[in-house]
Amino acid sequence: MTFPASPMRMPLARAAVHAVLLLYTALCLGPVLLVVMNSFKTRASIFSAPLSLPGPGSFDLVGYMTVIGQGVFLNYFVNSLIVTVGSIAAVLLFGAMAAFALSEYRFRGNRALGLFLALGIMVPIRLGTVAILDMMVASRLVNTHLALILIYTAQGLPIAVFILSEFMAGVSKDLKDAGRIDGLSEYTIFARLVLPLVRPAIATVAVFTMIPIWNDLWFPLIVAPGEATKTVTLGAQVFIGQFVTNWNAVLAALSLAILPVLLLYLMFSRQLIRGITAGAVK
Amino acid sequence: MGSLQLQAVRKSFGKVDVLQGIDLDVADGEFVVFVGPSGCGKSTLLRIIAGLDEQTSGNLRIDGKVMNGVPPAKRGIAMVFQSYALYPHLTVAKNMGLALAQEGMLQAAINTRVAAASALLRLDALLDRRPAELSGGQRQRVAIGRAIVRQPSLFLFDEPLSNLDAALRVGTRIEIAKLHRQLGATMVYVTHDQIEAMTLADRIVVMNAGVIEQVGRPIDLYNRPATLFVAGFIGSPTMNFIGGADAARVNATTIGVRPEHLRVAPEGDWIGQVSHAEHLGADTMLYVEVPEIGLVTARILGDVVHDVGDRVGLTPQSGKIHRFDADGRAITP
Ligand SMILES: Nc1ncnc2c1ncn2[C@@H]1O[C@H](COP(=O)(O)OP(=O)(O)OP(=O)(O)O)[C@@H](O)[C@H]1O
Ligand SMILES: [Mg+2]
């Protein structure tokens, strides 16, 4: 009786769902909007009317001028991009390879290894900060991009292996076996048959890995605070002083920092949506 | 070329012995069908022949050459999977040509081979499509085509038709039979389907719980099953088994009579009541409840009218009674 929603109740239920979704969207987008809006306003109107849109009286690009005028800020962007892209690449490559091995081959300790890797999901890597810093100092990696890439790769691998091995186990066994009979090497089977079929999972992992890396303040501050390796999030801190904060510049820097990560996200999400596997196996 | 020899092949997964010593010789050009209940190890045996799994012990020869440990691509075999297992991102032509390209064959030569195979399977119009754009029957033909282009000495099929609907299955079955005649290659074929086994096989291998119960021509398995298991497995509907006094009278523990070998008349050796009747047009199945024996199936040619509750007599045709001893082995006269 209750299963087919009656025509009367349908719109109500729908409205409720949409109300919840809209509320959530507003919650998520509100702060971002506020930052972007205020980055285009004069300092006075940021404080007097923070919720109003930039108008003829309040419009001001001084924040952007300051950020771009600083010159080094472009370097911070490049640093962030190097670290993020490098880490994603390493996480996806090594994560996918480990996931393939764990899901495809039976060997002693397979399950134990999988569990060990999954453990990393539960233990936050920041607990090891002191040890990590020691290691970086000992190996002379402080203030290098590599230091950050290594840390973020370690941080991202557990969840990547976990998600990807689930998906890879779901790829038809017959398909891989057909490849073996056709003489494909294990590497080709991995790269040409399995990877394309788990592309949506890879895009998911990429997005989930990328955002915390881009936004991270902790590790750049600790292992790579030098001018040459500063990331955007760390760089924006220069405008936050103990006594005066250049809000125009901070807001402009943060607004600009959204752009590259948004671009990366759009790139991956196109992959996420693209249907691929239909009809591979009945 | 294309003979296959298995000597004492065993396979264990951990503690489970899935194959318990398989000996089998398949002659060049022969069509051999493996049948057996689900889980008896048919696919496992096929995968061992293909080299996708390694046997725990025993020897495997293809073309007289020992193949233990040789990778699948180097065994001169091709395999067709139940799920087709076509490469989703490649066109039909690329799917068929991939193995040859992998061997380093020139594109022109690959094209010739693919063209020949696709002509044989009527796939010419589909060569540029991807698997997602094909029907189930077409996909299975592409999978068979992919096997053919390699010109293997041994074809392996694992239930290739079980995902197709009934009409398509008959068509493809006939196509496979033709293909076997044209190519003259050795084929090993796993199926659950009685009719496929009976019609395609030169010899049928009946497997049960990891051992071979009997190997023989289809008609021999039908006429002279070596064990109770084979007698019950080959033939549809299954043979009637009768124990007790009726069996003891002919010095057996169990006797078996096929439904088509029972005469139905008002009187007979066994008298019972019709409990159900199935009218298939060409023949009629009568399920007769016989006191002290149980349900006996009889198959009568043509459409015969019998109502539920009718009293009928059943008599086995002379010479069509199979006798089995206490171990389930056939007693030969
Ligand atoms: N990788 C494996 N690990 C453990 N046991 C396995 C494995 N593969 C197969 N088995 C077991 O081996 C037995 C035989 O399996 P197999 O797939 O060969 O059966 P089959 O005869 O092909 O059955 P079906 O007719 O259902 O396809 C089964 O009991 C199965 O559980
Ligand atoms: Mg099977």
Image (cartoon, grey):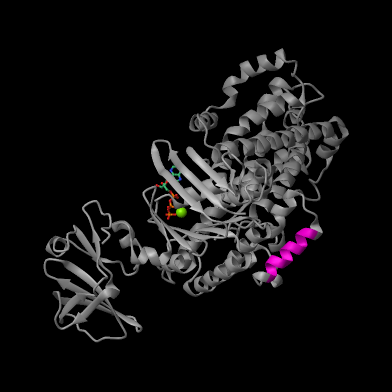
Q: Residue at x 66, y 30 (%)?
A: A152
Q: Residue at x 30, y 66 (%)?
A: B238
Q: Residue B329 placed where, x, y %?
A: 27, 54
Instruction: Between residue B210 and residue B14, name the one nearer to us.
Output: B210
- Does B122 sit above or below residue A68? below
- The magenta span reads B109-119
Q: Residue at x 57, y 60 (%)?
A: B29
Q: Residue B101 placed where, x, y %?
A: 74, 52
Indicate yes or no whether the magenta region holds residue B141: no
Q: Residue B121 placed where, x, y %?
A: 64, 70
Is residue B171 rendered to the left or right of residue B101? left
Residue that extends furthest to the front in the rendered view of this protein: B333
Indicate yes or no whether the magenta region holds residue B114: yes
Is residue A10 rendered to the left or right of residue A35? left
- Does A46 sit above or below residue B185? above
- Does B301 sit above or below residue B244? below
Q: Residue A78 placed where, x, y %?
A: 81, 34
Q: Quadrant of the C terminus of chain A?
A: bottom right
- Does A251 sit above or below residue A139? below
Instruction: Between residue A275 and residue A183, name the one nearer to us.
Output: A183
* Residue B32 can be seen, yes or no: yes
Instruction: Between residue B26 and residue A168, name the one nearer to us.
Output: B26
* Residue A244 can be seen, yes or no: no
Main SS category, magenta section: helix
